[in-house]
Structures are given as C-alpha cells and as structure tokens.
Image: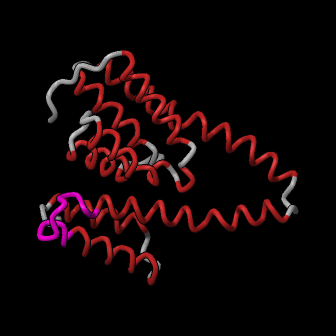
Amino acid sequence: MTPELHLQALDWLHIFAHYLSLSLLTVGGAIATAPEMHRYLVTDQGWLSESQFNSSIAIAQSAPGPNVLFVALMGWNIGLNAGSYWLALLGVCLTMVGIMLPSSLLTYFTSRWSHANRELRSVRAFKQGLAPVVVALMCSTGWLLASVYKDPQQDWPLWLTTIATTLLVLRTRVHILWLLGAGGLLGGLGLI
C-alpha cells in the first residue's frame, strides 16, 4: 500500500479534470484509456501503487456489471490512500462523473445528429475510420497489463496468457467469461 497521501482541493480538481479529458478518449470503452490512467495516477503522481492499479482493473473486469467499474475502484483507492472512507467516496464520485459525463453527452448528441445524417459520406467514413483507433487503444491496454513487472523473466507468463487468450477469442467460440475465469484461477493459484 502507498503511504498516506495529503491531497489538497486542487489535487481533487486535477483528478476530476483528468478524467473529464480522458472521457473524450473512451472510444473503445474506459479500459482503452488505462495506459494514460496508469501514467497519470501511478507514474506521475504516485497516488496509486502498481498493485492497486492492476487490482482495480482485475477486480472490476471479473465482477458482474459494467467494465467501467475499475475507474470507481481507482477513485476509491486514491481516497483510501488519502486517509478516509469519505475521501474514498469523493474519489469514486469524481472519477466516475469525470469519465462518464463528457462521453455520455457527446454520444447522445452525436448519435442523434449522425442518425439524422447517416447517409452522408463523411458520417460513414468517420465510423469506418474509428475502428483502427479502437483496436490500437485496446492493444495498448493489453500491452500495459501484460508488462506489469517490467521484467521479461517475470512477465512471460502474462504474455503467454495474453497471446493464448487472444488466439482462443479469434479462433474459437469459447465464451470470454470462461477465459476470464481461467485467468482468475491461474492468478489465484499464483501461476501468473
């Protein structure tokens, strides 16, 4: 666990503003912005440890419900590191409202406009051009999560699991929940 943080009101405002800006990059879902969250929260600010960051993603992805819950867990951990459950609730509120509000409003208004103008060539081109961006963002998240130790001798089981899971998803009809369960079991047994 990280030592107790002493966050000022301006720090909380920065967290909220950072998540507001990340919200506009959540084209492939909030998980696609995980590398930027890692850079900001773990590397630059030191508000979360590597373990807290990775655990937030792992717990939220294995739990039922929307996969954006990892953002709430990160906010919760920041607040706990700052010293209280009230700050943890504040962290949850700031990170979730920050990540949800801009993208929700943008999605609402642009979907109404693009539906009304769906026959325009520019609308069709935009939709087709966005697909590679989403794939690249998802690949960067996978890269980050499979390089947790920053040491190839320790990371190879994670890479092997990532490659095997990717191939199973692409080549078979195995449901993703079975793969998530298998990954959880391997992690629980300490194999990855």
Q: Is residue 7 left or right of residue 111?
A: left
The stretch drawn in magenta includes residue 149: yes
Q: Is residue 65 left or right of residue 48?
A: right
Image point 84% across, 65% down: which residue? 121
Image point 32% across, 59% down: which residue? 144
Image point 50% across, 42% down: which residue? 22
Residue 147 horizontal/vertical position (percent): 25, 62
Please provide the residue range marked out in magenta.
146-157
Q: Nearer the viewer, residue 122 or 68?
A: 122
Q: How is the image coloured?
A: secondary structure
Image point 32% across, 19% down: which residue? 87
Q: Nearer the viewer, residue 59 or 118?
A: 118
Q: Is residue 137 above or below residue 5?
A: below
The stretch drawn in magenta includes residue 191: no
- Quarter of the N terminus within the rendering: top left
Q: Is residue 63 above or below residue 136?
A: above
